[in-house]
Image (cartoon, helix red, strand yellow):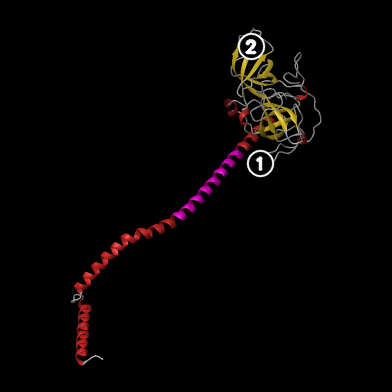
Amino acid sequence: MLNHRTRIILAVLVIIALTFTILDLRGGKGPFASVRSVVSSALGGVQVAASVIVSPIMGVGSWWGTWGDQRTRIAELESQNASLQDTLIRSAEDRARADALDQLLRVAGVGRYRIVPAEVIAVEPAQDFTWTVTIDAGRDDGLLADMTVINGQGLIGRILSTTKTTATVVLIVDASSAVGARVAGTEEIGILSGTGRQDSLEFQTLDPLAALKSGQALLTFGSRSGRPYAPGIPIGEVVDVSGTAGQLTRIATIRPFADVSTLTVVGVVIRPPREDPRDSVLPTPPEKADSANVDAPAPTGVEDGASPAPTASAKPKKETAAKPVPAPTPSAGVATDAGGN
């Protein structure tokens, strides 16, 4: 129990405290203002010090969570980038394949060659040959040994052997390859031989007096019944001639039109044209192409009455066996099966 004196002291203290509080609240400059300022300054310093100490610790946790999110986002972006790159690569490959097929159909259309399109699926030596490739068409597609193989630039080679679904092709650059060839724009013929190099062939004319010069193009002379080589197919261009006219041996170096190291889409000639296309399959020089009739109907790439050739967006249709047709009549005194028949 509080005595009388203690109660008086407590009452006085309460009255004083209330008085100071009322005065401080009313003016903001009461006797507690300086005390409050001191306490606020002290507490502010403590808060700043705590922020300096605690903020890095709290920041580590926040940074770790953010870094985890960033790693996940980076992984997603890398995956999307890889997917886009694959799409671009496939798109470029598809465009290149479509362009190769378009060029092949142009050659087939102009030369009136009946072809079966195919794709190169392997490059490897076969039997006694070094330069051979495997294509994804075979006997089921009407392919037989010694059929001519071309692409959009010209002659590739001939079929060596077949299975039901594939065929092995000997390329013209193989050292054992020989093709009967004709100089474009003339009647000069000779034997074209492979050198084992992908960018070089050799041509020897049958007439030692024949005039040869750089820039002249060579085409296949043609074999009997179009096998192993159909007539009129572009082969290459003369880049150098050794010897002079009249020498028994004159060898011309030929650069093939087709790059056998980048083969994709090829065509197998299952039926040659009824007539030798002569020089018509050779690419048109730019100055002549500009003056050509743009309204002329585009060649179909198939024989009269045959099914249309496949487009770049359609799967090649397998050809059916065709009726035999007369072979081109050779010039007098010249063999038609030079280089492989």
Identity of the residue drawn at 20% across and 77% down: 27
Q: Which mark is residue 313?
A: 1
Tell me the CA gap for discs 2 and 1.
46 Å
Q: Which residues are magenta?
A: 67-95
Per the image, is 72 magenta?
yes
Q: Picture coordinates of residue 238 (x, y %)?
A: 61, 18
Q: Which mark is residue 250?
A: 2
Q: Picture coordinates of residue 111 (x, y %)?
A: 70, 28
Per the image, is 275 magenta?
no
| Residue 81 shows in this picture | yes
Give the crowd class for mark 2: few <14, some 14-19, many >=20 residues within 10 Å. many
Identity of the residue drawn at 69% across and 32% down: 134
Note whether 172 is above or below 266 in the view shown. Answer: above
Q: Among all residues in the image, which is located at the extreme bottom?
A: 4
Note whether 23 is above or below 104 in the view shown. Answer: below
Helix, strand or loop under label 2: loop
Q: Is residue 337 left or right of residue 218?
A: right
Q: Among all residues in the image, which is located at the extreme front?
A: 1
| Badge 1 amino acid | Ser
